[in-house]
């Protein structure tokens, strides 16, 4: 699913660092939409700095963690990222990350977004139970 969704992005190649095989009991269409939104946001950011985007995953403690790392400028106001209709993008609607969080929580998981340290860029992380 991760590799297929990463391959949908046409503006730049999205690198996939495969983790261990894992099966998640979830709605595949909803997870696909969640990943499309996270990857699209990462590519939007990376295009502003000519950086890259990498998607990877790990398994630990009964959870899968899917990380979407971009080499963009980072987020200047992370406190408002999950507020409905708040956007940092020209022409953005402010519902993409809110939808991501709702999908993750409906599956017993969570989505976070933090500036990478060391930078540059951000990491969006999806955590789901397995």
Image: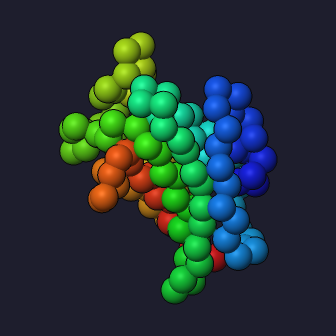
Position of the C terminus by quadrant: bottom right
Residue 123 is situated, as x and y percent measured from the top left of the image, at 42, 53
64 displayed left or right of 102 = right
Q: Where residue 64 appears, x then y in whole percent?
A: 58, 72
In terms of depth relative to the viewer, which is nearer, 95 or 123? Answer: 123
| Colouring scheme, one of rainbow, by chain, secondary structure, one colour | rainbow
Q: Is residue 31 in view from this perspective?
A: no
- Among the 4 quarters of the image, the one containing residue 40: top right
Residue 129 coordinates in the image, percent (x, y): 57, 74
Residue at left 37%, top 22%?
89
> Does residue 76 appear in this view?
yes
Residue at x 53%, y 34% (from the top left corner): 43
In the rendered view, does 34 fall on the left or right side of 44?
Answer: right
Above/below status of 45 relative to 63: above
Q: Nearer the viewer, residue 72 or 24?
A: 72
Q: Residue drawn at (33%, 36%), measured in percent from left and top?
A: 73
- Which part of the image, by quadrant, shows the N terminus? bottom right
Front in this rendered view, residue 120 or 68: 120
Q: In terms of image quadrants, where is residue 57?
A: bottom right
Side of 113 relative to 4 (left or right): left
Quarter assignment of residue 6? top right
Check the image and report above or below for 117 versus 128: above
């Amino acid at each position: 699913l991760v590799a297929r969704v990463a391959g949908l992005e046409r503006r730049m190649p999205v690198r996939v660092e495969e983790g261990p095989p894992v099966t998640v009991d979830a709605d595949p269409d909803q997870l696909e939409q969640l990943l499309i939104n996270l990857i699209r946001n990462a590519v939007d950011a990376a295009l502003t700095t000519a950086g890259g985007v990498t998607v990877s995953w790990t398994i630990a403690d009964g959870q899968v963690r899917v990380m979407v790392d971009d080499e963009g400028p980072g987020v200047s106001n992370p406190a408002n990222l999950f507020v409905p209709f708040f956007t940092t993008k020209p022409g953005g609607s402010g519902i993409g990350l809110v939808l991501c969080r709702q999908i993750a929580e409906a599956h017993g998981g969570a989505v976070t977004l933090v500036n990478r340290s060391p930078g540059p860029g951000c990491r969006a992380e999806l955590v789901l139970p397995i």
